[in-house]
Image (tube, grey):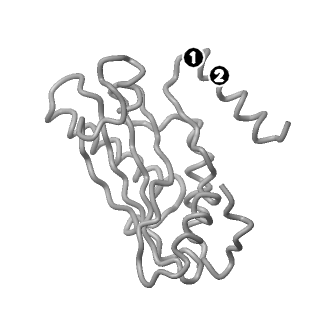
């Protein structure tokens, strides 16, 4: 078994035992960016590269769960390279439908703002490259009728935009197979 698989199994067992709300990204941020850069290799100027990660949150929490931090570190490190210096992030904060709608909109924004603070202060990412948006209970990804569904709706999505012209010169098709 590869080292990443072993660590993912450990994290999954830990999360099940503690009841934490968490979902691992399908790919690392670097894998995601290389694949999306290849798709947009002929684009001119800034393009939308996609949603690189979704962080799930415990009810009423504004803190990103600890297992996400290695992915956040990788994302910020990759975006600090000269090849990707034009890239920017949009953090979109959401909640489930529990409670007051206006309070949920504020909570969704607070989650995104707190994540921005973590990226800027914890990982030394340029704050001018991060935009924060709060949507509260809008755009649920699962039913709010179950705890599992509500846990999926309490999230911050990290979207990436940038000019891929420099980065794509160093990406080969072999690296981008799904």
Identify the secondary structure beneath mark 1.
Answer: helix
Would you say 47 lies left or right of 66 here? Answer: left
Provide the residue designation for mark 2: 14
Q: Nearer the viewer, residue 92 or 124?
A: 92
Q: Please rate how many residues cluster around mark 2, counting C-alpha atoms within 10 Å: few if below 14, some from 14 to 19, many from 20.
A: few
Would you say 41 lies left or right of 103 here? Answer: right
Image coords of residue 50 (percent x, y): 45, 59
Tell me if residue 66 comes above or below residue 19 in the rendering: below
Residue under the point 46% across and 44% down: 54
Quadrant location of the C terminus in the rendered image: bottom right
Provide the residue designation for mark 1: 18
Quadrant location of the N terminus in the rendered image: top right
Residue under the point 60% across and 18% down: 16
Residue under the point 64% across and 58% down: 31
Residue under the point 60% across and 48% down: 71
Tell me if residue 120 comes above or below residue 151 in the rendering: below
Q: CA distance from mark 1 to mark 2?
A: 6 Å
Identify the secondary structure beneath mark 2.
Answer: helix
Tell me if residue 130 comes above or below residue 57 in the rendering: below
Image coords of residue 135 (percent x, y): 24, 44
Image coords of residue 175 (percent x, y): 72, 65
Asked where in the image residue 41 lies, by quadrant, the reply is bottom right
Instruction: Specify the label residue 90 is tagged with.
Output: none
* Tag 1 and tag 2, C-beta contact below 8 Å: yes
């Amino acid at each position: 078994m590869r080292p990443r698989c072993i660590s993912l199994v450990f994290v999954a067992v830990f999360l099940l035992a503690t009841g934490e709300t968490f979902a691992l990204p399908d790919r690392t941020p670097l894998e995601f960016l290389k694949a999306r850069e290849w798709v947009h290799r002929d684009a001119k100027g800034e393009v939308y590269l996609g949603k690189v990660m979704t962080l799930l949150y415990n009810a009423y929490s504004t803190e990103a769960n600890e297992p996400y931090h290695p992915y956040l570190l990788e994302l910020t490190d990759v975006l600090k390279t000269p090849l990707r210096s034009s890239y920017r992030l949009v953090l979109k904060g959401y909640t489930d439908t529990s409670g007051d709608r206006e309070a949920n909109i504020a909570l969704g924004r607070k989650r995104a703002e707190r994540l921005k603070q973590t990226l800027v202060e914890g990982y030394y990412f340029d704050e001018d490259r991060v935009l924060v948006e709060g949507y509260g209970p809008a755009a649920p990804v699962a039913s709010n009728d179950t705890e599992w569904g509500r846990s999926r709706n309490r999230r911050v999505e990290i979207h990436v935009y940038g000019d891929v012209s420099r980065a794509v010169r160093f990406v080969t098709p072999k690296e981008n197979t799904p």
